[in-house]
Amino acid sequence: MIDIRSAVRPESDSILVKIADYVVDAEIKSEAAIQTARLCLLDSIGCALMALKFPACQKLMGPIVPGAEMENGATVPGTRYRLDPVQAAFNIGTMIRWLDYNDTWLAAEWGHPSDNFGGILALADYLNTQRLKHDQNPITVSEVLIWAIKAYEIQGVLALENSFNRVGLDHVILVRIATAAVATAMLGGNKEQVTNAISNAWIDGGALRTYRHAPNTGSRKSWAAGDATSRGVRLALMAMAGEMGYPSALSAKQWGFYDVLFKGKSISLPQEFGSYVMENILFKISFPAEFHAQTAVEAALTLHKTIKDRIDDIDKIVIDTQEAGIRIIDKTGPLIACE
C-alpha cells in the first residue's frame, strides 16, 4: 500500500506559502492598524448584539443539534450559549453580518473582513477556557487585534485584483481562507499546518452568489459569512489533528481551483501582506445600506423634503451609478411607496 502522505508531492503554490509565511512570521507594528482594529472589534460587537433583536437571526443561534452545548465551550455574546468553537464561530459570524452594517472592503472583489471575527473570537474564547483550566496565560485582546489585522490583510489583499463575483462565486470564499490561516496559527500551527488548512479551504471551492441576486435573493446572504468563518475554524482544527494538505490546490491542471472555478486565470497578489487593509478599512457610519449605495441614500434623504409632496409627478427614475453597484444591487420594476 502506498502512503500518499509520503509520496512525491509538488511544491506548494506560492500563494499558499506566502499566506503561511505571513500569518506565522509577520510582526504587526502599525499603531494605526492596531487602533483601527480596536474600532473594528467594537463595531462588530455592536452589529452582532443589534442583530439579536431580530427573530430571523435568533432562530439560527445555538448548537446545530438542540441541546448539544459544551460546558467549557466558547461564549456566544448576548446569549446563554456555550458552544464548540466551530458552531460558535457560525453564531458569532452570523450575528456580525446579519444587518450588513459591519465594515467593508472595496476592490476587484468586495466583502466585509470583520466576518473573520466570528472565527477569531470563538476560538480565542474557547482557547482561553482551556488555558485558564491549566493555569496558563490567556489570549489578550491585544493578541485578538493582531490576528484580526492578519485576517483582514489576507482577505483584502486577495480581493484587490481578483474578482470572484465575475465568475459567479461569492466573496465569502475569502473569509474561509483568511479564517483558516489565522485560526491554525492561533492554535499554534506551523507553516506546514497553515498551508494544509488553507489548501483545503481553496479546495472547498466557493459558494455561488445565487442567494444575493434576483430572483433568488434570500436570507443566506446574512449567514453565508458565518458559515465561511466557521468552516475556516473546522479546517484549522483538522490541520492541527494531522490532516494533510494539497500543495497544488490552486494550480493543478484540470482539477485545481484555477482551471475548475477561475476560468484558467491565476490569483494575483499585487503587494506583500502587511497591515494595509486594516489601515484603510471602510465603516458604514452614515447608513445601514450596501456600501455602493451610501451616496444614493444620502442623496435620497437630502432630496426628500423637496420631493415628498410631488411623488405623483414622477414618471420614471433613471439612475446612473458605478458598474459594480449596478451588478450588485440593481432592481427593476414599479416604484412602491413604503410606510
Image (cartoon, grey):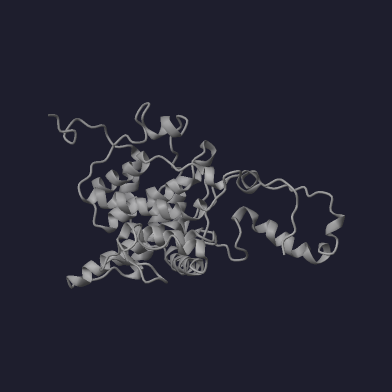
Q: In this view, does 45 lie above or below 242?
A: below
322 to the left or right of 169: right
- The extreme front residue here reads 66
Q: Where is residue 336 in the image (x, y as percent from the top left)?
A: 74, 55
Q: Residue at x 57, y 44 (%)?
A: 216
Q: In which quarter of the image is residue 72?
A: bottom left
* Quarter of the figure that contains the C terminus: bottom right
* Residue displayed at 83% across by 59% down: 311
Q: In this view, does 10 lie above or below 231?
A: above
Q: In this view, does 68 lie to the left or right of 173?
A: left
Quadrant of the snapshot with the N terminus? top left
Residue 83 on image: x %, y %: 32, 63
User: Which of 68/202 is in front?
Assistant: 68
Above or below, 249 relative to 92: above
> With respect to residue 34, does 159 lie above or below?
above
Q: Which of 45 and 336 is in front in this view?
A: 336
Q: Estimate the x, y position of residue 63 in percent, counting from the top left.
A: 35, 60
Q: Which of 279 and 112 is in front in this view?
A: 112
Left or right position of 107 against 17: right
Tally of marks: 0
Indicate the quadrant where residue 250 lies: top left
> Image point 31% across, 61% down: which residue?
123
Which residue is the extreme one toward the right? 313
Residue 134, image x, y percentages: 17, 70
Q: Which residue is drawn at 22% across and 72% down?
A: 132
Q: Can residue 315 be seen in this view?
A: yes
Q: Is residue 119 visible?
A: no
